[in-house]
Image (tube, coloured by chain):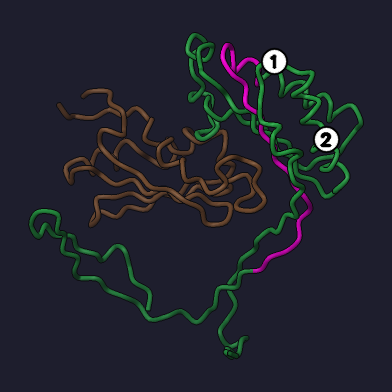
Chain colours: A brown, B green
Amino acid sequence: MTRILLSALAHARSGDKGNMCNIRLIAREPRYYAILVREVTAPRVKERFANVCHGNVERFELSNLFALNFLLHDSLDGGGTVALQADPQGKTYGSALLRMIVEAEVE
Amino acid sequence: MHRRFTTIRLEDAGPDRVRLHGIQGRPATDSYKVSISYSAGFKSTGQVAYAWPDALKKAQAADRILRERLDRPGLRFDAVRSEYLGASACHGMPAALPPPELAAELPEVVLRFGVRSEDRAAVVRFTKEIAPLVLSGPPSVTGLGSGRPRVEDVVAYWKTLIPKSEAAPEVTI
């Protein structure tokens, strides 16, 4: 097992749904999907976004697409037009998640 | 028709080609989504850029000054937020702040400052605080060129579902 930056295993896109941020994490290779499922759990994502996410984190598994979808409730400073933050749509949250360090059995 | 992402099958179909198949749908639901906008006060955001050296420290000092200037007259805000573009703004978490030795050498950092309030006068007062900050606050600062930040109406958004039986769709051209 190696400690590795999540960006080596996956890429991500994110955006807003009201005051919710939606992060899609997609394995770069099908064989990495199981590592994502094991390492990138809803509680760990919640911990990662503790400063901005004041609600639950829900995780949805899309094994057919080798992807995970996360919904971060109450995470966009009120959302859309209300938010004061520089990124009211959470477009950069995906890359924030990719900074996470995970344990992986890859070379 | 609702397409279900969990039913999509991916298949490698040669260089730069992917075949998608097996996609199943479900019938439309018996509800409509309703998007409602409502007036929710006022907001304004302004930004000024601090240049090397110690750009982040200067921006942080400016933030302290600005907050004190807004506190003193007892202005009431629903939200006050400062961010440091170029140092940590996007990822919004302490882990994203550059280490001190790197922070000291950043070419520039933009202090982005925003307020929101039901009280328009408080927001207007905020917009008048940027110029004094530039003129008498930490040096090597720019961003005053476009004048005072604008005061914006906040149009907030609320969504819900209603039964289709409650609505009679009609299109007029």
Residue at image position (62%, 31%) is B83
Query: Is B143 covered by the magenta stretch?
Result: no
Q: Is residue B73 above or below residue A94?
A: above
Tell me if B117 is positioned left or right of B165 in this view.
right
Residue neighbourhood size for the residue with mark 1, other residues' Cα within 10 Å, grouped as few (<14), some (14–19), many (≥20):
some
Look at 29% across and 62% down and name the residue there.
B6
Whether residue B51 appears in magenta in the rendering, the answer is yes
Residue B139 lies in what quarter of the image?
A: top right
Disc 1 is placed on an element classified as: loop
Q: Which residue of the protein is positioned furthest toward the top in this rendering?
A: B101
- The residue that appears at 17% across and 29% down in the rendered structure is A106
Q: What amino acid does circle 1 point to?
A: Pro
Give me the C-alpha separation between circle 2 and circle 1. 19 Å
Residue at the spot of label 1: B139
The mark that comes first in sequence, 2 or 1, is 2
Task: Say the numbered circle drawn on residue B128.
Answer: 2
Q: Quadrant of the N terminus of chain B?
A: bottom left
* SS majority, magenta: strand
Q: Nearer the viewer, residue B102 or A36?
A: B102
x then y, percent, for residue A75: 56, 45
Q: Of the residues shown, which amino acid type is indicated by label 2?
A: Lys
Q: Is residue B102 left or right of residue B166?
A: left
Q: Residues within 10 Å of mark 2 (few under 14, many from 20)?
A: few
**Rendered-image quadrant of the C terminus of chain B:** bottom right
Q: Is residue B83 above or below residue A16?
A: above
Q: Residue furthest right?
A: B73
Tell me the subunit letter for badge 2.
B
Q: Quadrant of residue B68?
A: top right
Magenta region, residue range: B36-59
Q: Position of residue B126 (x, y in %)?
A: 81, 36
